[in-house]
Amino acid sequence: MAKFYARVAWIALWSGVLLATGLFIYTGAVLIPSALRERAQMRDRMVQLERKLAADERAIEKKKAFLEKLSTDPEFLERVAREKLRYAKPDEWILRFEPSLTE
């Protein structure tokens, strides 16, 4: 009877070793590569977002500089109002020429 229990214990031990080996192989073959792929994708996404953030920060700085110049330089304000808003002084006329259809 002791031989039977020894044999069962031996089979249980080897079953545990085989199970542990299988889990180790599964982890190495399936889980680790997918985790590495996901990490690389996240790193690429982070680089894209950092580039977009830098571009957005540059755009904000340009707009702040534009607003600062509008509020401090009356000649610049007048030029912007004339060009973008098509404003004119009370004694001026604005002539707009439409492009011809043949051009």
Image (cartoon, helix red, strand yellow):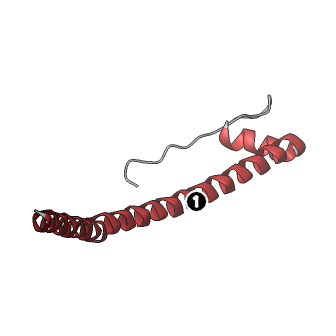
Q: Nearer the viewer, residue 94 or 45?
A: 45
Q: In the current view of this chain or complex, which residue is farthest to the top?
A: 90
Q: Residues within 10 Å of mark 1 (few under 14, many from 20)?
A: few
Q: Residue at x 63, y 59 (%)?
A: 54
Q: Nearer the viewer, residue 92 or 32?
A: 32
Image coords of residue 51 (percent x, y): 57, 61
- Decide if residue 5 is on the left or right side of residue 84: left
In which quadrant of the rendered view does residue 36 lie?
A: bottom left
Q: Position of residue 2 (x, y in %)?
A: 14, 65
| Nearer-the-camera pick, 10 or 27 | 10
Splitting the image into 4 quarters, where does residue 67 fall?
Answer: top right
**Relative to residue 45, is residue 23 drawn left or right?**
left
The image position of residue 90, as x and y in percent, is: 80, 28
Label 1 belongs to which residue?
A: 50
Q: Position of residue 101 (x, y in %)?
A: 38, 47
State the image quarter where residue 89 is shown: top right
Q: What residue is drawn where x is 26% and y is 65%?
A: 23
Which of these two is toward me, 16 or 28?
Answer: 16
Locate residue 97 relative to residue 73 in the image: left or right. Answer: left
- Hey, what amino acid is under mark 1? Glu
Q: Residue at x 46, y 64 (%)?
A: 44
Q: Quadrant of the C terminus?
A: bottom left
- From the image, which quarter does the N terminus lie in? bottom left
Determine whether the residue tagged by mark 1 lies in a helix, strand or loop.
helix
